[in-house]
Amino acid sequence: MRIGIVANEFFDLSIGRMGGFGWAARQATGALRRSHGPRFETFFLAGEIKATPGQPDPLVHDTPLILRRDDAAEHAGRVRDLGLDLLLSIDYRPHYEALFRMLPETPIVVWVRDPRTPEDVRLIGTVRVPNADAQIPPGLVTPNCTSLGGVVADSAVAGRPVLFATTNLSLADKIPSVYGAAPTDVPLLPNVVDIDPGAVEKSERPSVVFLGRLDPIKRPWIFAELARRFPDVDFFFLGKTHFQGTGCWEPGPSPGNLHWLGHVDGDRKRQLLSEAWALVNCSIHESLAVSFLEALACETPLLAAVDPGGVVSRYGLCAGRWEGSGLDGLPRFAAALSRLLEDGELRRRLGREGRRWVAETHNGPQFLRAFEHLCRRAGCAAGPPDGGAATDSGGPAEARHDG
């Protein structure tokens, strides 16, 4: 079965942004290609990224990436020649519509990850970099995604299935206002979190991490200010900015306990998350951040200003919603962080419970089971001959704890 994974980013520094949509594309292709058979062949389809003249399509995460071309007819022919059985859309952005219309009979699964309602858009628009209130920071504009409603309506007339699934069931209510479609059933399609830290051992000196792009919407300056308030704690920025120039945050001199590590992945990221006492997320908006799941997989509780689906309040502490720069909420962030650092029993309990939840819910086998169910609903033959669920040797091991 041939799957086209549609996205605007693919978690590769050489070809663009390093965000949650790209991470999801990478994890999905890995899980599908590892499933026994092999029953799935995957291709990345770029909604936005264009090839330069003469540039061949690259191989990314062992998956061919079909780039956009200036010649629309040629590009459409190349996409059709792939013989795709299903499109897995990593959320939806207007750039995807052209690909959907190139393949008017191919079923679509829209994996809803970050739907932004009009109220979400308003809230995001309040962000300002400290001491730069006159400048609108880059990266705050949310595209209008209601064109998906037209694709869904036309597909219904043509008999093409368009299914929706989500990483967090609490997001389903946002779908009509965000995409212009009103599906009656939105099942869970879990993330593929494959971090297995083994027996977790926290750092002797307290440490906390910020995992994500250092862009204005994430408000990294709150984390930097927390570092000044907690000189006996190590603070680690894991990430880099995507935007440059006017309106961006320009950090001043850093305290000695604030460490800038840039983009970190693999064993190094697992080590830092496993040693950390807390993950701090200062963003004004999140749906179900990948960083939350990866931290919890390493038994690291959460501190954030958002609480998507109650995840933060179940496995950490919520500092409350703060508009603008968010610095008005700094005392609440500091109080919550003090509580996590000082209450070892609370910290360990939240970490263990979070790890158990991620291990049971967001893993390769659960993703494959849910994906195969969606394939059957879409009329695609995806399951193994005996009708059982696939296994994925790349999924996380059963959670282990250090007591």
Image (cartoon, rainbow, N blue to C red):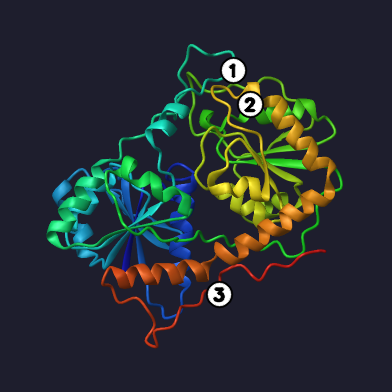
- Say above or below: 138 vs 59: above
- The answer to whether the residue labelled 2 contacts the one labelled 1, judged by CB atoms less than 8 Å apart, is yes
Q: Secondary structure at mark 3?
A: loop
Q: Residue at x 65, y 25 (%)?
A: 329
Count of numbered marks: 3
Mark 1 residue type: Pro
Residue 260 picture location, percent across and down: 68, 35
* Residue at mark 3 to residue at mark 1: CA–CA distance: 47 Å
In the image, 388: left or right of 216? left
Relative horizontal placement of residue 144, taking residue 310 as reference (left or right) = left
For residue 221, above or below residue 398:
above
For disc 1, the marked residue is: 130
Asked whether disc 3 touches disc 2, contact meaning CB atoms under 8 Å apart, the reply is no
Identify the mark at residue 221; answer none if there is no mark: 2
In the rendered image, the quadrant that contains the N terminus is bottom left
Circle 2 — which element? helix
Tell me if mark 1 has few (under 14), some (14-19) or many (20+) residues whose alpha carbon lies within 10 angstroms of its own.
Answer: some
